Image: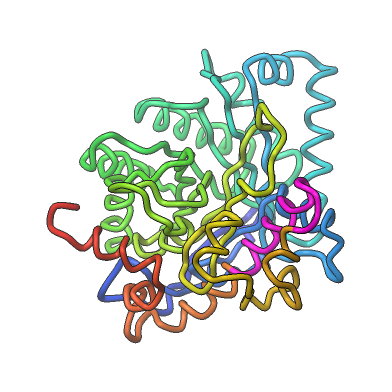
Amino acid sequence: MGPWGRAILSIKVSGSDETSGAHTGRLEIGRRRIELPGRLLTSSEFRSGKAAKLAEPLESPLLIVGKLFTPDHLKAATSAEAAWQRFSASVAATARLMPGAARLFQPEFLSVEFEDVEPLRALLDLQHLLSFDAITVPYGEAPSSEDVLTAYDFARSWAKKRRIDAALLPVVPPQERREDAAALLAALVKRGADGIGLDLDGGFPYHTLRAVEALKERHPEFWIHAFQVPPKVRFGGRLATSEGIILPYFGVDTFSRWLRPPPPAPVVKDKINVFDPRGWGVFRWHEQEKEYGSKLTCRCPVCKGKDLDGFFEPDDRAVLDLAKVHDHLSMDAELALARKRIGDDGYAAAMADHKFARPFLERVSRPEAE
């Protein structure tokens, strides 16, 4: 604990990898310990677990508390008392979904720009008032590097005035150039940041991830969490590679599923992407059937005892909930196995052993990828 009783964040590295940026270790937030690399549970996934009526609820040492903001929603919530009370009550209810878990706030902005620091101040106050274990420092949908640094400087001043010693986690968007990403990360390290929340924004920012990898070689204790991770990698053409499972290759410590606005049309189950633990790929219903047939080898509570048609038998919404739960449990199990390879034959070797991670590994290993 810090001098004012709030949880302190730290990473203890136990193993590193010569063939990639991956490393093993433990993230500690107060009394909670998270094995690295790891996948963190989102509030959306937790709710899907409840809807799926699992025998046991999903568990995680840390819950990502997600909230979508439109411009009107943010303006009302941060300037009008009634809207603020409704908003804070909603976030508080979500934060209580998993008693005993650490909580990290993920505000996701839809066409939102901060015109001044007041929305930031309100979001910082909210996290402090609700006793979040680390405090994210956002600044709208697509902040510049200068915005990120200004927001972090403001948050440090805010924390000092309120005698708050919880870790501050600036939210960093992808950068166009690797040098720009490296400079921004270096500036945050110099300012004393404990880590960053890297907003992937549903993409695969290769050069920013390479900058992260280089930073982690020099500062392995610096926490890198990736928000907004999409199902598949979009890199060099169409790949079936799962994006989350390959992020440790670049030194990412933890990651979480993307938070998306409701689709304009109802979800259709044969369009739902599902993680493939056999090959570390991602497939829709009939793509998976074409690749593997109807047999499911996954032993997670969602898949156990079912074939492919049985998995997709419920209605569309139920299949989406089941897919979210399966993705979290099966990927978490694969990461636990892969952690044993780091420091031994390496994370790249684990990727090479999986059919749909292998093509990605071959592409990022080429000189032209640099």
Indicate the quadrant where residue 7 lies.
bottom right
Q: Is residue 327 magenta?
A: yes
Say which residue appears at 25% left-offset and 37% top-offset: 180
* For residue 245, side relative to residue 294 (left or right): left
Observer-nearest of 239 and 155: 239
Extreme residue in the left direction? 367
* For residue 181, side relative to residue 144 (left or right): left
Q: From what the image shows, is residue 243 above or below residue 85? A: below
Say which residue appears at 43% left-offset and 47% top-offset: 193
Instruction: Give the image location of residue 361, x and y in percent.
Output: 29, 65
Q: How is the image coloured?
A: rainbow
* For residue 197, side relative to residue 79 (left or right): left
Say which residue appears at 81% left-offset and 17% top-offset: 81
User: Magenta stretch mostly in which secondary structure?
Assistant: helix
* For residue 328, side relative to residue 365 (left or right): right
Indicate the quadrant where residue 5 lies.
bottom right
Indicate the quadrant where residue 127 lies.
top right
Instruction: Name the image quarter holding the N terminus.
Output: bottom right
Q: Is residue 335 magenta?
A: no
Observer-nearest of 6 and 247: 247
Numbered circles on residues, count: 0
Instruction: Give the image location of residue 274, x and y in percent.
Output: 59, 58
Say which residue appears at 86% left-offset and 71% top-offset: 55
Bounds of the magenta span? 313-330
Instruction: Give the image location of residue 100, x and y in percent.
Output: 78, 62
